[in-house]
Image: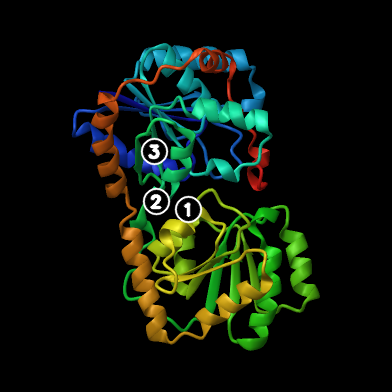
């Protein structure tokens, strides 16, 4: 069996997964390939196609972004490369994006299987009725879905009249990179948050809540790692409400983030929405209890209320304040129990689990009847080239 994972680009967290999957799958006689489209244009400046020179891993346009290229050139290059690799199964992202759209087209034209992975739930994405109808029609053409966790199944089942095939577990990180060296210690009186400083991350409400925390737990500090267009606005707000226990640390090297996690007592993420939120995995792998907005999809799978943390309503400053103070006022033993629970939970979402679930799913997908699109779906598939609008990633209707 020849398997291809196809993406617009491979951010750093995907690269770790691919490097794990290559030898793992080849031990089981699966010829594994990875194909990315663009080496430029990612909103994550630390991501690059450089260094991926292996024959099994290709980048079609290493020096270009989507906006630099005409659609016909992209389509022609994709078709030629997929013809060369000639995969039996293509795993690609949402059909909204370029790789998903073009991977689906090639698979349907050649009678091959297309597996779609996605960590956004369709109802969370705001589109007009016509666009949404067309998108859902295309999603139904996928032969299987690789989803982060079983909580996603119901949403995708609703889009498929015939029962779809689901498997799970791709939203993993290298947990070992974040593991604490010894027993987690509490007493630093630091909470930490890591994110881009954009409106979607909801730091304005977190700072308003921290004003109350500062009054009721003055020994505690909030550390915020990350940069972005809201940095100045947030700094001005912190000064205006006299927050003297908040540290804006700016951009921190990825390799140094585990050290900051290990010094903190808990991780906070107040986002108005996250399609998943892999930083939650990282914090849990570092042994941190988690305090999360209930609009973060990762919280549905990884947060066990009162066991390894607390959830809060992102738009309620009072609720954020209450949950932060509830954690702060726990005993050291209670915090240590939450830390241990985070480590136990995240151990079930590992590279090894991801590989096992993919390996188990592949023969089942291969044995299923290939979905054949109807006339309308076929016509749309032939015309739709996908998009790659990273500017919208910081908005709720991206």
Residue 72 percent location from the top left of the image: 60, 13
| Residue occupied by mark 3 | 146
> Does residue 62 appear in this view?
no
SS for dot 1 = helix
> Does residue 290 appear in this view?
yes
How far, Cα to Cα, is label 3 from label 1? 16 Å
Return the mark for residue 173: 2
Q: Earlier in the sequence, mark 3 or mark 1?
A: 3
Which quadrant is home to the N terminus?
top left
SS for dot 2 = loop
Q: Nearer the viewer, residue 340 or 50?
A: 340
**Which quarter of the picture shows residue 91?**
top left
| Residue occupied by mark 1 | 278
Mark 1, other Cα within 10 Å: few <14 / some 14–19 / many ≥20: some
SS for dot 3 = strand
Residue 319 percent location from the top left of the image: 62, 73
* Residue drawn at x 29%, y 25% as measured from the top left: 368
Q: Earlier in the sequence, mark 2 or mark 1?
A: 2
Return the mark for residue 101: none
Relative vertical location of residue 62 with respect to residue 148 in this rendering, above or below:
above
How far, Cα to Cα, is label 2 from label 1? 8 Å
Q: Looking at this rendering, what residue extends furthest in the front direction? A: 161
* Residue drawn at x 60%, y 53% as measured from the top left: 273
Q: Are marks 2 and 1 in contact (CB under 8 Å)?
A: yes
Q: Nearer the viewer, residue 263 or 351?
A: 351
Residue 370 percent location from the top left of the image: 34, 20
């Amino acid at each position: 069996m020849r398997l291809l994972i196809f993406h617009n680009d491979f951010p750093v967290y995907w690269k770790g997964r691919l490097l794990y999957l290559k030898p793992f799958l080849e031990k089981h006689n699966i010829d594994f390939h990875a194909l990315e489209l663009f080496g430029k244009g990612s909103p994550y400046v630390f991501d690059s196609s450089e260094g991926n020179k292996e024959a099994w891993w290709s980048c079609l346009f290493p020096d270009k972004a989507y906006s630099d290229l005409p659609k016909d050139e992209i389509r022609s290059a994709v078709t030629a490369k997929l013809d060369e690799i000639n995969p039996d199964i293509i795993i690609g992202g949402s059909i909204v994006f370029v790789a998903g759209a073009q991977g689906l087209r090639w698979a349907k034209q050649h009678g091959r299987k297309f597996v779609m992975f996605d960590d956004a739930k369709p109802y969370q994405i705001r589109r007009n009725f016509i666009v949404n109808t067309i998108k859902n029609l295309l999603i139904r053409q996928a032969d299987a879905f690789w989803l982060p966790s079983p909580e996603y199944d119901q949403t995708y089942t609703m889009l498929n009249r015939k029962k779809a095939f689901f498997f799970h577990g791709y939203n993993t990180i290298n947990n070992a990179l974040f593991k604490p060296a010894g027993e987690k210690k509490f007493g630093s009186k630091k909470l930490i948050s890591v994110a881009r400083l954009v409106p979607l991350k909801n730091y304005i409400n977190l700072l308003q809540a921290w004003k109350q925390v500062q009054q009721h737990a003055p020994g505690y500090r909030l550390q915020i790692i990350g940069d972005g267009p809201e940095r100045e606005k947030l700094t001005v707000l912190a000064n205006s409400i006299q927050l003297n226990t908040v540290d804006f640390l700016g951009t921190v090297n990825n390799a140094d983030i585990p050290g900051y996690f290990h010094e903190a007592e808990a991780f906070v993420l107040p986002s108005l929405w996250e399609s998943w939120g892999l930083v939650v995995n990282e914090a849990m792998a570092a042994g941190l209890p988690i305090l999360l907005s209930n609009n973060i999809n990762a919280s549905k799978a990884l947060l066990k209320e009162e066991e390894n943390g607390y959830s809060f309503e992102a738009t309620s400053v009072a609720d954020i304040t209450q949950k932060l103070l509830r954690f702060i006022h726990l005993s050291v033993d209670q915090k240590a129990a939450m830390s241990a629970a985070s480590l136990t939970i995240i151990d079930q979402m590992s590279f090894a689990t991801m590989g096992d679930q993919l390996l188990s799913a592949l023969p089942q997908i291969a044995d299923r009847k290939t979905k054949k699109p109807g006339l309308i779906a076929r016509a749309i598939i032939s015309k739709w080239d996908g998009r790659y609008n990273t500017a919208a990633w910081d908005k709720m209707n991206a």
